Amino acid sequence: MKGKRILVVGSGGREHALAWKIAQSPLCADLFVAPGNAGTEKWNVPIKANDIQGLLQFAKQEAIDLTVVGPEEPLSLGIVDAFEAEGITIFGPTEKAARLESSKALAKAVMKEARVPTAEYEIFSSLDEARRYIEVKGAPIVIKADGLAAGKGVIVANSKEEALQGLEKIMGGAFGEAGRKVVIEECLEGQEVSLLCFCDGFTALPMVAVQDHKRALDGDRGLNTGGMGTYSPPPFWSKELEKEVMDKIALPTLALMRQKGTPFKGVLFLGLMLTAQGPKVLEYNVRFGDPETQVIMTLLKSDLVPVLEACIQGRLQETKIDWLDETAVCVVMAAPGYPGSYPQGIPLGFPEITSSQEIIFHAGTSRGAQGIVSSGGRVLGVVGRGESLVAARERAYGLIKRIDFPGAHYRTDIGWQGLNQKKD
Ligand code: AMP
Ligand code: GLY
């Protein structure tokens, strides 16, 4: 059989991890990444991730057999609809299905209709009414801009004053159109965990569960970021919990999306809080997570390509996915100052890697005249894999010490929740 020509869309650590995994597939003959980073440079083509027409032209000209989309922006711009209209095979949800992420108000309505457990909430378009609601409900309380706000549109307020200030900021124009409507909801308590599922419109297959670290500083202090590190699987995760999430959350969501005429294909990313009353949904994302994907691809034993094709062709029911029985830890090395302002062009030096249990995924990197330099906030995702969380952490942090990245900012406590919890 002729090998496949595969295109990955995006330029972050997530896309490097997807490309790294796809490149190992015996089904893949040629790989392209648009636009990619220095870690994917041998596959890069200079087309931006949200240039839908440019990507479509490229896929047609180059006879691409499969396109895999990383970020949410091209999905919410309708890249899947544009490709499908021309009969070109692509992995991801349509623009309408992608609204599960691009509108938090719609996501809550879907959860309600599908009877998926989530925080109690109200939706407001009027600042005065929202203010009154906060006055009545008090704190702690959570305020979310309805639209996409690069992960910064959520305020978990511990006092009424903080809540009112956050509300003014979101509805006062700081988030533009995304803040015209707000979701105000009950504050949930528990362990936060991400469960990503492959979906074919009808059924869903879960990936390994992951814990992300969103805050910039050790001890979960500092500003929210795109994610400073991940590990998988958390020791408290179990097959029973996975089944509960699939039965009460993933499958009812897919059934409702099908019923609404917007079947969901692609990756459904469930942001969950494990509360005393059971798992509840914090948010849906409609794509692979970053940096969740870096540990997920490290632990995926099966070939990724047939799984992506099974999703597109509605054959997930007959698909089995195998995972390594190990733990993976990804520590993000960021530019000094991230998530505030930070310099670019920092020269990076890489050690020789001789173990398959150590991987460096690039994110904000590019090739300068003198070698590879930083070109973004989150620069590298440094992954260690091992038979235990302790062993995986040692590998990841050992590898960091061998990387030359002056002034790098990274957390030293990735996986702390797991270290604090024994398995039974
Ligand atoms: P989201 O973008 O909706 O996932 O929100 C970003 C972060 O805010 C989540 O990862 C949680 O840490 C926190 N968060 C969101 N909703 C709630 C909630 N209802 N209760 C407590 N924390 C929340
Ligand atoms: N790491 C969280 C996300 O990808 O949205």
Image (cartoon, grey):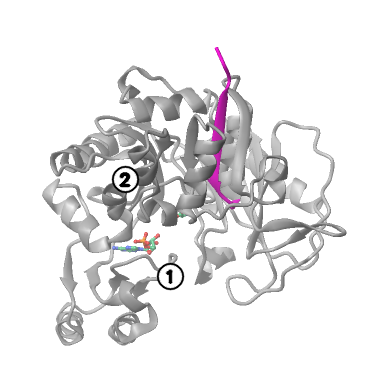
Asked if residue 206 lies left or right of residue 351, the reply is left
Q: Residue at x 45, y 45 (%)?
A: 288
Q: Secondary structure at mark 2?
A: loop
Q: Residue at x 42, y 33 (%)?
A: 89
Q: Residue at x 51, y 51 (%)?
A: 54
The disc label shown at residue 160, or none: none
Asked if residue 251 lies left or right of residue 421, the reply is left
The disc label shown at residue 94, or none: 2
Label 2 and label 1: CA atoms lie apart by 24 Å
Amino acid beneath label 1? Lys
Q: Closer to the camera, 221 or 60?
A: 60
Q: Which residue is mark 1?
A: 152
Q: Closer to the camera, 269 or 309?
A: 309
Label tally: 2
Q: Secondary structure at mark 1?
A: loop
Q: Is mark 2 within 8 Å of ligand 2?
A: no
Residue 383, how many percent across, how many down? 65, 43
Asked if residue 9 is among those painted magenta in the image, a careful observer would answer yes
Asked if residue 288 is among those painted magenta in the image, a careful observer would answer no
Residue 369, how many percent across, how many down? 85, 60
Residues shaded magenta: 1-12
Circles 2, 1 touching at the beta carbon (< 8 Å): no
Residue 51, how many percent across, how many down? 49, 55
